[in-house]
Image (cartoon, coloured by chain):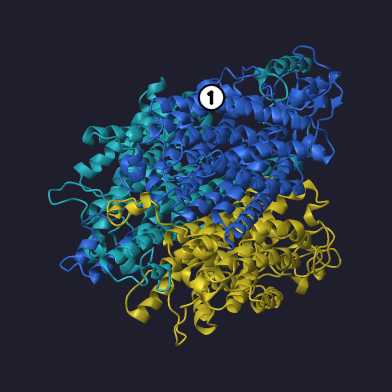
Chain colours: A cyan, B blue, C yellow
Amino acid sequence: MADSALTPEQLATVKEQVFKAIGFREEDGPVVQRPAGPTSASDTDAEAALDTDAFFVLFSGYLVFFMQCGFCMLCAGSVRGKNAKNIILKNLLDACFGALGWYLAGYGLAFGEDSNDFLGVSNFALHDVPPSRYHNWLFQYAFAAAATTIVSGAVAERTSFVVYLLYALFLTSWVYPIIAHWVWAPTGWLSARFVYKSSLFNGTGLLDFAGSGVVHLTGGLAGMAGAWIAGPRLGRFDASGKAREIPGHSASLALLGVFILWFGWYGFNPGSALAIVDSSEIAALAAITTTLSAAAGCITTLFISMAISYNATGSIMWDVIGAGNGVLAGLVSITASCAVVRPWAACAIGVFGGLFYTLSSSVVLHALKVDDPLDAVSIHGGCGMWGLIGAALFADERLVHMTYPTILNDDTSQARRHFGLLVGGNGQLLASAVVGIVVIVGWVLGHMVPFFLLMKKMRFMRVDPQQEAEGLDIVHHGGSAYPRELKGSSTDKLTAGSEPSFNAVQNSKVIRDIMN
Amino acid sequence: MADSALTPEQLATVKEQVFKAIGFREEDGPVVQRPAGPTSASDTDAEAALDTDAFFVLFSGYLVFFMQCGFCMLCAGSVRGKNAKNIILKNLLDACFGALGWYLAGYGLAFGEDSNDFLGVSNFALHDVPPSRYHNWLFQYAFAAAATTIVSGAVAERTSFVVYLLYALFLTSWVYPIIAHWVWAPTGWLSARFVYKSSLFNGTGLLDFAGSGVVHLTGGLAGMAGAWIAGPRLGRFDASGKAREIPGHSASLALLGVFILWFGWYGFNPGSALAIVDSSEIAALAAITTTLSAAAGCITTLFISMAISYNATGSIMWDVIGAGNGVLAGLVSITASCAVVRPWAACAIGVFGGLFYTLSSSVVLHALKVDDPLDAVSIHGGCGMWGLIGAALFADERLVHMTYPTILNDDTSQARRHFGLLVGGNGQLLASAVVGIVVIVGWVLGHMVPFFLLMKKMRFMRVDPQQEAEGLDIVHHGGSAYPRELKGSSTDKLTAGSEPSFNAVQNSKVIRDIMN
Amino acid sequence: MDAFFVLFSGYLVFFMQCGFCMLCAGSVRGKNAKNVILKNLLDTCFGALGWYVMGYGLAFGETANEFLGESSFALRDVPHRVYSNWMFQYAFAATATTIVSGAVAERTKFEAYLVYAFFLTSWVYPVVAHWIWAHTGWLTAFKVFSADLFNGTGVIDFAGCGVVHMVGGLSGLAGAWMVGPRLGRFDADGKPREIPGHSASLALLGVFILWFGWYGFNPGSALAIVGASDVAALCAVNTTLAASAGSISALLLSMIISYYVSGNIVWDVIGAGNGALAGLVSITASCSVVQPWAALIIGFIGGFVYVASSNFVLHVLKVDDPLDAIAVHAFCGMWGLVAAGSFADDALLRSSYPALLDDSNQPVSRNYGWVMGGDGKLLVSAVTGIVAILGWVLFHMVPFFAGLKLVGLLRVLPEQEHEGLDISHHGGSAYPKEMVRSGSWGSAHGGEAYIK
């Protein structure tokens, strides 16, 4: 497991001797003077590097895709058993419809080669896309699907199936791609990757490395619109408007989802380097900051919720779902800045992410009276905003220069990028982040609120109250996710010979409860 | 070891390494200046190799991290439903506190650049760690978290939450890193990677490629200390001291955990090559031996338990949880030796691993009267020991030389490494393995027994009996992991107004069945 | 680098074992959950042994003839650089094996299943793999000279529609047919009754894991990344699109059917999950040789094939297949081969398969799909491949299962089946009652009895 067979002292001595002998100075950097080899060999090297990058992006994309599984399990565990199949199917289908929407329209709008500041206008249905960009399509598809699936949690247990399908198609084929274009496409007006500093918005562009704003804020706001317009679940608020808990049916499934999401986030954040050759340090840094922020978010949320419950009831309660959501809050918060902040700042961002989550969750529920079964609005919307701001506050000068390409002044001299307010920089990044947040909020709500209102008007939005009470699985999906066993199972044995008394029935119910 | 005077041979080796690192070839002649211009192909080549290695280590680290999910599901499925949330939260938090402990103290103690035989003394909180080592931090963090989480199973269903958090911090920030330093750091006194054979402990060092000893034995022993001091769960032993089964609440979750762990182990073992360029054969061999040993361990355990049940009751019983634990036993057993044994030996190690697991499980339970709900002590402690011994018995000469770096005699001639007793070698490796086991046992128990005893003294260790009987989820975590639906849900609606007749009860039962 | 890629793809394929296990577990009744989980675990384990001892040598042994390989058993004399390939191919063999566990679930004897798993991985599967994927196999598309290829084309089965899925699915057909339906699956008139699984959550968890693992299965089958990253990326794109299309078409089709039959709309969750799998299976043969739009079509039709063949198996053949494994893997596997023979694109064939020479050492283009303007030769080869696999698998597996049935090893006793295999064979339910009742009301009704 050791890196080197020599002690550092020894190695340093030898290095010094060797360098002296060949006239090499360390500050010169790696030797670049090479004898002219066969050109084909260097071509091969360059090709191999591209292949390695494609490999990295593909596997990161697979991990991001696996987050669909995480979201699905998280949602399934966090709703009542009577709606489990419904939400699982919604999660499966936003991956499927997302693929269609992204294939037909989304990718072209976001990353089409012919494009302007505002959107791309070519490469629809993968037309004329060279195969060497296919890995990028897959990676970006997984992001689009992640943005889409966030909403399923916010509108769970009461929205109709059809409206969700329409929504999924609409988001992946129009709303999300445009934002992705603004921030990530080479020509987008908020991009941080122009060559000339003067072309960058506000001289900075929007720092959103892996999508706190593009993916999470978008998804969270769409969820907000949906949950608000759909209205709360039956029984979520009592007559006096006080919120009542409606716990999900399986904490195990929910936390399985959290773990899978954390795992998948290692594709989301480090994978956003979009290359590994010459970027491995960026990817590794992103992996570390992701880990630390998630841990900090979890611990913060846990202790805050513990303190609140202690104040409120006098007994200490360690909230499991809260801790899981804290992990997600930390992950969302670091997403924008994962490659541009130092590890200590990642801890800070995670801690504040946990705080913001708790805070915004309570605002959404108690002040806005919006019923969000999975806290998706606060996790993805609230922490998504904080993520953009956190990037603007903590972005480290050296890391920004390492992660983002060199920019030039108008006289083609190399320009310095702005960096974070709290680490010695100025407020330019913060200004850009605020602008970014405002336009994303405007764009998403400007589309999703009318969309959901229209659906409501057409009575598509929400299932009937009696259907909601009975559970969507029985009404729409042909039976419960956890059906009772048929006659002939062990249950019969246990009740056999006993009177069908209340007690016997109760007993067999116990068994069945457990069996199911 | 000699710090200043280097032998010509050694100088040559190091020269070669240094040249490779800076992209210099001797035939190029002395470097006089660093030419300007774009980097050449060969430079890209060397850099790309490092990047590829970083990529490999990162993705292996992700897989190892995913083992947290596996452990979590395994633990959740193996405890009773009333404690599911508790153990899930413990598993989540050891990943989180583990990250903090490893960040602040652990990594510096284990792999800090300034270090002595016993521990590292720099690089705390990633201070002064070059980004090119960040990927290693992540990988090693995942290992530390794996060692920590082993204990959660052994002390499940009865220990208090706070003591577990303190334990997790203590293990990842002090107990585990020291052992990792001894065995894996370049300067550790048990390391197998010194340059001179005479510097190696016993002329061999400890062969522990991926951590049977460092990770699993450490975790298993800490679990032993915890389970022993916490005492058995209520009802685990009857009045006469005979053990009674307390089955877990979901075999599906437990086996999901086993599969995820097996998957993650492909990061654990092959990933420990820490490089893929020029090491792909080592990694591939490790993947094969891992597979075969897991299969052999599973089959052995299954048939042993079948034979035992047949002897005891006369009917054949195929034990699912036992088979799953057999997989883990095989995996732990091969961990130390995965890159230095041939595939047939991997089968043998797996078979004996299954045997040792069954044996030690029965010793722990019936002789020591220690209640270990997940058999973590026997799987990780028992098979961890066997893994070190197995490596010493079966290590193949050629593979040892392929996997570990070349070592030199004092006269700087190349030295032969010792290899396994059963494949033609001598007992030196075995002696080292025994020493390794003794010091790990001493170190871990020397810390964890006093730690847990202190906790017990302070009455932190264990929850109240009535809390234990009621279940930790309700007492500490605000309700069951699988809550019944609240009043006001559909149940009431459907039964409202009907007599509490058999039929009504049946109806509400149906609903509840579905809910649960 | 390539070894790295192959290894990690192999890990993903291995993870499909977990997916199958969860899918099976969720799709059976709770009383048989442990049984089917253990079967899935053990085919992984016995598969490893069978593949190690026999399978790899038969399929990819270095000395080989057209029909099978004859060396490299137990990894003997296998050079280390091939080790990553062993790992990858093992995961494929285990996948083929595990398909059957679903088809024969809830009623088959445990011992019979173990014997089957060993038999398939050590003999039936490796021979088929050799035919199509080994350089010397008679159906391979990997020979240098066009004249050596079967029909001038060989069978295009990039990632194993035929080799893996048809083999598994047909074995499942043989098994499910021989073992007979579960008790209560058909009523007295022979009308099928639904026996829903105990947890849709687990089943769909399995589907998601399978989809994730398929990204190892299809792109990984490029077996290299350097110089092949475009191929791998195309496979990943096509895999995604086909899975989506399959899921959507199966869902809509089953919705329409339910609307016709019962008058109300049912969105079938398990059907959608199986549809995704159907799409994945359908694209497996052709993932590297068709354009993305063709992948959509292939997946879409795959969903139809799944729904149609599922009804065919159940209503016409009267075979009880709890997981629809036969429809998903055997029938969509066939469709996948046919699709590859129809939609294979000229340029993509050349980029993902090696260059071909005619007898005078001149480069010669490969035959491509008739839909794309080529001729029917690929389709003929695909049909030949289907027939050969059908014959080989059924010829072995039907007598095998019939033999087991004859000696009484195939099926559990009716009362055991009634009670549930977990209790009769595995020492208790997968979800046992708690000894001390949790919850508020449990303790009020006899819960105390367990405390003491």
Q: Is residue A265 visible to us here? A: yes
- What quarter of the picture does the C terminus of chain A occupy? bottom left
The quadrant the N terminus of chain A occupies is: top right
Residue projecting furthest to the front: B240
**Identity of the residue furthest to the top in this view:** B4
Q: Position of residue B16 (x, y in %)?
A: 78, 26
Q: Please provide percent x and percent y for residue C281.
A: 57, 66
Element carrying mark 1: helix
Whole-percent x and y of residue C123?
74, 66
Instruction: Please say if B113 is above or below A111.
Output: above
Position of residue A132 relative to residue C303, above or below, is: above
> Does residue A84 appear to the left or right of B54 in the view shown?
left
**Quadrant of the image occupied by residue B15:** top right
Q: Nearer the viewer, residue B201 or C351?
A: B201
Q: Which residue is mark 1?
A: B447
Residue B221 vertical placement versus C245 (above, below): above
Disc 1: which chain?
B
Q: How many marks?
A: 1
**Residue A2 is at least partly visible in this image:** no
Q: Residue furthest bottom?
A: C189
Circle 1 packing at 10 Å, graded few (<14), some (14-19), many (20+), is: some
Q: Is residue B126 toward the left or the right of residue B419 in the image? A: left
Amino acid found under the numbered disc labelled 1: His
Residue B463 image position (x, y, % from top left): 37, 36
Q: Nearer the viewer, residue B343 or A221?
A: B343
* Nearer to the camera, B179 or C68: B179
